[in-house]
Image (tube, rainbow, N blue to C red):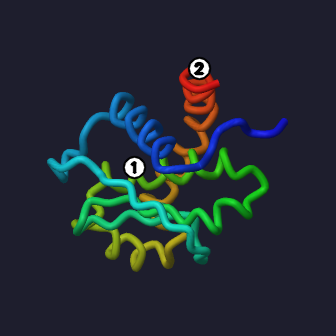
Amino acid sequence: MKSPLVLDKNLAKLILGWCQNKFGKSKFDARTPKIRLYKATKDDYGMYTSQTCSISLYNGSIQQADNPLEEFVNTIIHEYFHYLQPIDQCYDALTTYFGGYNNNPLEKQANEAAKQYVPEVLVYLISQLG
Ligand SMILES: [Zn+2]
């Protein structure tokens, strides 16, 4: 089935709003994350920058995924979890302790949350826009 949804900033903001409703604000940052949508292709689909409290999305890479809509949603949930986590306090120490990015429990938590909630967000998006 072809996706009727366009992967643009409005869609990103709708997904961000869903995350805010579902998970609330970060205990470690009183700000609300901003979305930065780039056309660029990167090694990653997205990134969370704690200094600026922003979620960057690399749409060039996302568009090349097997299911771009799913990957778009997955990436926003993943990065939103980084916003919820004590990134500044312990991300680097955990990466060192567990021997790499992929073993960092904060990454595992973000991956698991994204995987768990993608279907619910897709249903929400279709109900809003479909
Ligand atoms: Zn991550």
Point 40% across, 75% down: residue: 97
**Which corner quadrant of the image does residue 91 belong to?**
bottom left
**Residue for point 34% across, 75% down:** 92
Of the 4 image quadrants, the one containing the C terminus is top right
Q: Amino acid at mark 1?
A: Tyr
Q: Could you say where residue 19 lies in the image, as x and y percent from the top left?
A: 40, 37
- Image height of 91 relative to 106, above or below: below
Where does the N terminus fall, quadrant-wise? Answer: top right
User: Image quadrant of residue 3?
Assistant: top right
Q: Which numbered tag is attached to residue 80?
A: 1
* 93 relative to 80, above or below: below
Q: Residue at x 22, y 66 (%)?
A: 89
Q: Is mark 2 within 8 Å of ligand 1?
A: no
Q: Which mark is residue 106?
A: none
Task: Find disc 2 in the rendering and name its residue.
Answer: 127
SS state under label 1: helix
Give the spatial CA distance, label 2 vs label 1.
Answer: 22 Å
Foreground residue among 3 and 30: 3
Closer to the camera: disc 2 or disc 1? 2
Q: Is residue 50 left or right of residue 103?
A: left
Expressed as whole percent of the image width and height from the top left, the position of residue 78 reads: 48, 52
The amino acid type, in three-letter code, at marker 2 is Ser
Disc 1: CA contacts within 10 A as few (<14), some (14-19) or many (>=20): many
> Would you say the residues marked 2 and 1 are in contact, meaning their CB atoms lie under 8 Å apart?
no
Q: How many marks?
A: 2
Looking at the rendered structure, the secondary structure element under dot 2 is helix
Residue 56 horizontal/vertical position (percent): 43, 63
Mark 1 or mark 2, which is nearer the start of the sequence? Answer: 1
Asked whether, in this view, residue 14 is left or right of residue 115, the answer is left
